[in-house]
Amino acid sequence: MPNGTPAQQIADLISTPLEELLVALGSGIGRAQAELDRHSIEIQKLILEDPVLSQYGLEATWYQIPKTELELKIAVALEQPAPKAEPSRVAGVIKKPLPRLWAQPVNARYTNQFSYDIQAASTVKLSVVAVPPPGAAALAPALTEEAALAAALPHLFTDAQGRPEPRVTLNFNGGARAWYIVQTAEQDGTVILRALVKVDDETGRVLEHRGGPGS
């Protein structure tokens, strides 16, 4: 059995401060949700860039982890600050050293090595709940359809009056914060992509364009 204080003994078994354990759990849930969101964004981009699908107002399916509940059985040790530990100053506020909790998941190795009674284990319950987005205003476009079309116009086919010709479809993607302007034509019953322009919603700058005059 390792020597030292209970906190040192737990640290020898790759324990972690309780706050770091909770942060790691929350971070893992956040990364999982981010991957789900990233997948939906990629599907939405494919829809918006497709000359046929983009005309039907289709939207990608969004998946959400509404609630995650965790219950951990851990052994807890209290580490007191060193007697001569100096207070720290954060943003002008003096903070005194505080005791720190160390947590070690109770497993067979820990139980056998320390003859630990599992009945004495502490239980940490954590619920991570999804909250509503900031509001529809957060996803509202900064540019109007007219402004987005004007930015894309140099990369579109136009008639003698400078109007886009043939058909043009505009779609705003709130996740990408960008406008997708798709110009198509129909030939023998087949929809043909003539031009695709992606416009940044914040700056009105053309981020990407395919087809169009001169292609």
Image: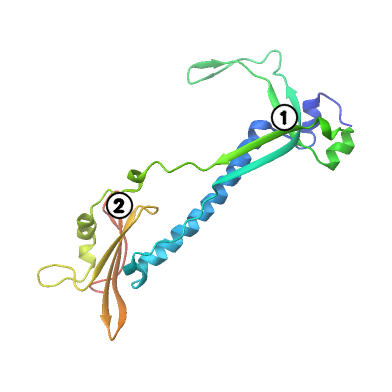
Q: Residue at x 84, y 37 (%)?
A: 110
Helix, strand or loop at mark 2: loop
In-front residue for pair 41/88: 41
Q: Of residues 40 and 98, which is closer to you in this image?
A: 40
* Residue behind mark 2: 201
Label for residue 102? Answer: 1
Q: CA distance from mark 2 to mark 1?
A: 47 Å
Q: Up-down: is 206 above or below 65?
A: below
Point 31% across, 48% down: residue: 140
Q: Quadrant of residue 129?
A: top right
As displayed, is residue 20 above or below residue 174? Answer: above
Q: Is residue 68 left or right of residue 153?
A: right
Farthest-out residue, top: 84
Secondary structure found at label 1 = strand
Quarter-wise, where is residue 22 in the image?
top right
Residue type at mark 1 is: Trp
Image: 31 above or below 104? below
The crowd level at tag 1 (other Cα within 10 Å; few <14, some 14-19, many 20+) is many
Q: Position of residue 42 (x, y in %)?
A: 45, 61
Asked whether, in this view, residue 90 is left or right of residue 2, the answer is left
Query: Quick check: 87 left or right of 82?
Result: left
Amino acid at pointer 2? Asp
